[in-house]
Amino acid sequence: MKLFGHALIAVTLMAAALMSCPRPGEAETLAAPTGRVLLVVTGAISTTNAGETAAFDRDQLEALAPQVLETSTPWTEGVQHFDGFPLAVLLDRVGAKGKTLRAVALNDYAVTMPISDLIQAGAFVAIRQNGEAMKIRERGPLWIIFPYDRDPRLTGDDFLNWSIWQLKSLEIQ
């Protein structure tokens, strides 16, 4: 009888877990930002919080999957310490379904990149540099970077052009 009780509890817990998962075709939800929006993601995404877009404030971005990337860059001196998250985590969080990503900076500089190349190269969204929130005049508030020291290919023209700073929006295409 004791074994039956444990099995019943396990089945009940499993059923509760399955009921809380989104059903096919049912969009997952994303909390609305409570602070100033730093990044807006649009296009072919399934998870939104502002109409058909996903808007993120600093707290939401810092909570995504905090990681550290230490690398030198062509625009800074010496090895830098970047806090942020892999771009792949953000794309997964918004349910990105496209093949390309169009990134736009505050000055309207824009570049379109193949998502598969970004993921394979370890694209990283930096939100802090050497422990400090990045200011606009210092390539902030967000900067797409790569682990440049890991692979010389990442210092080629494509990856340098894809290293967009003052990032404000992403459109999944």
Image: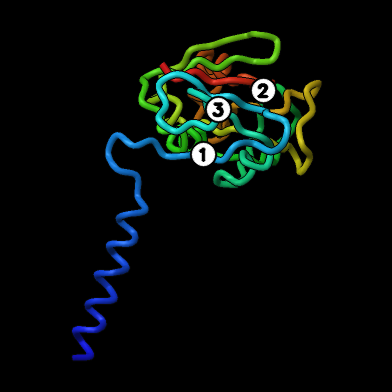
Q: What type is the residue that disc 1 sits on?
A: Leu
Instruction: Look at the numbered disc 1 and give the secondary structure of its residue.
Output: loop
Q: Nearer the viewer, mark 3 or mark 2?
A: 3
User: In which quadrant is the N terminus drawn?
Assistant: bottom left
Left/right of residue 85 with respect to residue 11 in the rendered view: right
Q: Nearer the viewer, residue 163 or 6?
A: 6
**Residue marked by disc 2:** 74
Mark toward the start of the polypeptide (3 vs 2): 3
Q: What type is the residue that disc 3 sits on?
A: Ala
Q: Nearer the viewer, mark 2 or mark 1?
A: 1
Mark toward the start of the polypeptide (3 vs 1): 1
Please tell me whether residue 99 is drawn above or below residue 38 in the rendered image.
above
Mark 3 surroundings within 10 Å by alpha-carbon count, few (fewer than 14), some (14 through 19), many (20 or more): some
Q: Measured from the top left, where is residue 89 in percent x and y?
A: 48, 39
Instruction: Look at the numbered disc 3 and give the secondary structure of its residue.
Output: loop
Q: How is the image coloured?
A: rainbow
**Residue marked by disc 3:** 50
Left/right of residue 10 with respect to residue 158 in the rendered view: left
Dividing the picture into quarters, in which one does residue 38 lie?
top right
User: In which quadrant is the C terminus drawn?
Assistant: top left
Instruction: Look at the numbered disc 2 and give the secondary structure of its residue.
Output: loop
Q: Which residue sits at x=61%, y=33%?
A: 56
Q: Measured from the top left, where is residue 45 in percent x and y?
A: 42, 26
The label shown at residue 166 is none
**Residue marked by disc 1:** 30
Q: Which residue sits at x=20%, y=86%?
A: 3
Q: What type is the residue that disc 2 sits on?
A: Pro
Mark toward the start of the polypeptide (2 vs 1): 1
